[in-house]
Image (cartoon, grey):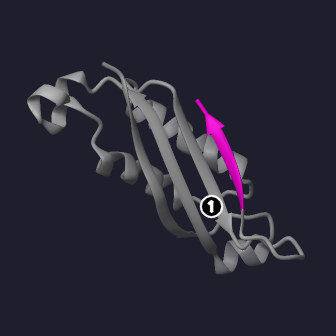
Amino acid sequence: MQGRIELCGMRFRAYHGVLEEERRCGGDFVVDFSCAYPFDQALVTDDLSDTLDYSAVYAVIAREMAVPSQLLEHLAGRIAAALRSSFPEMGPARIRVAKMNPPLGGEADHSAVVLEF
């Protein structure tokens, strides 16, 4: 049985951006993750070893969020590669990285990059 696992609204203070001020002062980011995962054993066993450990996924994402990137695209790509490397058993996945209040010269709640891998 194939299901989906989602971690939504992970919030980080990080130092990503093209502008020097963004890399110096930092900004607020929100990350959403989902993936297909074969958790049919977990349905029966109720054992963490039979599914994807959410805290381990969060740790991988947090580690990548701590490494500055200029582009959200690059950041999302690094997160995707790290997740795929750490959890090869996961199926098709999606990562969304949003920068809150991006410096656009006008008002915008956030900008975001979505990567399916």
Q: Which residue is mark 1?
A: 68
Farthest residue in the top direction? Answer: 1
3 in relation to 78, above or below = above
Which is nearer the eye, 94 or 27? 94
Q: Is residue 74 magenta?
A: no
Which is nearer the eye, 79 or 110? 110
Chief secondary structure of the magenta span?
Answer: strand
Q: Is residue 92 left or right of residue 49?
A: right
Q: Residue at x 46, y 60 (%)?
A: 10
Q: Position of residue 64 (x, y in %)?
A: 51, 53
Q: Position of residue 66 (x, y in %)?
A: 52, 62
Q: Position of residue 69 (x, y in %)?
A: 67, 57
Q: Residue at x 48, y 60 (%)?
A: 9
Q: Residue at x 42, y 44 (%)?
A: 6
The stretch of residues the image draws in magenta is: 111-117
User: Which quadrant of the rendered structure holds the N terminus?
Assistant: top left
Q: Residue at x 61, y 53 (%)?
A: 97
